[in-house]
Image: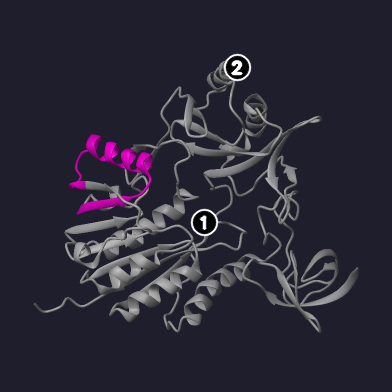
């Protein structure tokens, strides 16, 4: 049933929120101050028309906006959008009783995302290839993507054809595409088991189209060139499906903040180190102990260090930091540390850091809520929060990265 709604504010996922007698109603693609008509179902509503638009409403950059499920805020004026993202971090800190001036948001430019996850499915009408509509399993075919690097957008037709070659199931599957110095790295997941003929045809396609690598469920099918990325000038041959920061500019901004904060330390720990985006940069000045649970990522980091020149010593340790965090006694061997966990944060590890004597800590997070929780633990353990910098590497989405820098006075022994 359609009704008229007045939008009061934006929610944490970027949806407009209307206050009604029966509670809050979330209306995607609306802005505060707008009057809209929308079809309501429980606490959500589908926008039908904007009766009175906000002066902050702008034309979206993409024809697929509101359909593909990838962007939530293309209709939001740029400066107001950036302020809203900064406020997300501020509000998360405030909810945990943390008083800290949050720096201005480091902005994200369009056409810079280097790692994109597509959805695909074989149908009677052909291959569906694109993104999934929000709160749905429907795949929306796409012809453009203004957040992604041009190297990905220009390859959309080739990637769609490759999806058709590797599809061994009628079920939906994922295709992660990463831009590397060697070309496009394509990692397919859940497409079914490839037959020998499929493998041959797909391999020939990859060779003919100049792709760097094709892997299926972690197994390399063909690799004409090892996909390589640069971390502070150190080349790293990344494993299939490896985690990378979404944009290179955001990675450099984070690494710059972390590196400057930890520059006085002689021995550092990099927790949740991945393939070494922090560790290999930090090793230019300090010895680094990199800890990571993913074996292929850690192996890539170690290989990169061994073939690099001009770095201090980098040691590595495979360890599940959720199940077995470094203890405060182990941490006391270091002059500084950086931790960059998944969205769930690092609660147990933070408790050990809080008990430690490590004087310099950099916390990196893509989730303001879990970051605030972990910072509260560190502050209660004696750390002083020096700065928090939000970084927008997920353009037009509700997600925001942040780097928090902390210090603790050294104990007298």
**Residue 339: horizontal and vertical position, in percent?**
35, 60
Question: 137 and 287: which one is in front?
Answer: 137
Residue 121, by quadrant, is top right
Which residues, given as a range, are shown in magenta? 286-314
**SS state under label 1:** loop
Residue 383, by quadrant, is bottom left
Which of the marked residues, 1 or 2, is nearer the chain's N terminus?
Answer: 2
Identify the disc placed on residue 325.
none
- Crowding at dot 2, Cα within 10 Å, few <14 / some 14-19 / many 20+, comes out as few
Residue at figure coordinates x 45%, y 84% from the top left: 97
Residue at figure coordinates x 65%, y 27% from the top left: 168
Q: Is residue 328 left or right of residue 28?
A: left
Mark in the foreground, 1 or 2: 2
Count every numbered label the image shows and give the total. 2
**Residue 269: horizontal and vertical position, in percent?**
25, 57
Question: 232 and 8: which one is in front?
Answer: 8
**Residue 290: horizontal and vertical position, in percent?**
27, 51
In the image, residue 246 sits, relative to residue 359, either above or below, namely above
Res 315 seen here? yes
**Residue 360: horizontal and vertical position, in percent?**
25, 68
Quarter in which the N terminus is drawn: bottom right
Quickly name the residue at label 2. 201
In the image, residue 171 sits, relative to residue 390, either above or below, namely above
> How many angstroms separate mark 1 from mark 2 (CA)?
36 Å
Residue lying furthest left: 413
Res 285 seen here? no
Identify the disc placed on residue 393.
1
Q: Is residue 88 left or right of residue 313?
A: right
Residue at figure coordinates x 33%, y 37% from the top left: 235
């Amino acid at each position: 049933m359609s009704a008229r709604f007045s939008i009061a504010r934006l929610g944490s996922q970027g949806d407009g929120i209307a206050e009604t007698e029966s509670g809050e109603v979330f209306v995607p693609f609306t802005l505060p101050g707008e009057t809209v008509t929308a079809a309501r179902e429980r606490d959500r509503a589908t926008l039908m028309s904007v009766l009175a638009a906000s002066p902050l409403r702008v034309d979206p950059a993409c024809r697929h906006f509101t359909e593909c499920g990838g962007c939530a805020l293309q209709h939001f004026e740029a400066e107001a959008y950036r302020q809203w993202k900064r406020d997300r971090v501020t509000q998360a800190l405030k909810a945990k009783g943390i008083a800290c001036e949050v720096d201005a948001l480091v902005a994200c430019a369009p056409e810079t995302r280097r790692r994109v996850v597509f959805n695909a499915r074989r149908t009677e009408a052909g291959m569906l290839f694109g993104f999934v509509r929000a709160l749905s399993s429907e795949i929306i075919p796409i012809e453009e993507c203004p957040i992604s690097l041009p190297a990905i957008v220009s390859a959309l037709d080739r990637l769609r054809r490759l999806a058709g070659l590797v599809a061994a199931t009628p079920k939906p599957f994922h295709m992660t595409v990463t831009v590397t110095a060697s070309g496009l790295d394509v990692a397919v997941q859940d497409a079914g088991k490839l037959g020998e003929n499929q493998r041959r045809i797909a391999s020939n396609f990859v060779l003919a189209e100049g792709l760097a690598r094709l892997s299926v469920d972690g197994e390399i099918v063909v690799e004409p060139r090892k996909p390589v990325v640069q971390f502070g000038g150190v080349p790293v041959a990344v494993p299939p499906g490896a985690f990378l920061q979404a944009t290179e500019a955001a990675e450099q901004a984070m690494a710059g903040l972390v590196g400057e904060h930890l520059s006085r330390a002689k021995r550092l720990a990099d927790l949740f180190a991945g393939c070494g985006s922090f560790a290999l940069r930090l090793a230019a000045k300090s010895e680094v102990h990199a800890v990571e649970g993913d074996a292929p990522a850690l192996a890539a980091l170690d290989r990169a260090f061994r073939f690099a020149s001009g770095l201090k010593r980098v040691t590595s340790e495979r360890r599940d930091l959720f199940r077995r965090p470094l203890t405060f006694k182990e941490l006391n061997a270091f002059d500084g540390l950086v931790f960059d966990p998944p969205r769930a944060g690092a609660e147990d590890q933070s408790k050990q850091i809080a008990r430690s004597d490590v004087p310099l800590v950099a916390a990196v997070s893509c989730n303001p809520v879990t970051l605030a929780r972990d910072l509260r633990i560190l502050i209660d353990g004696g750390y002083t929060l020096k700065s928090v910098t939000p970084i927008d590497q997920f353009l037009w989405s509700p997600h925001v990265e942040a780097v928090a820098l902390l210090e603790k006075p050294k104990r007298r022994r």
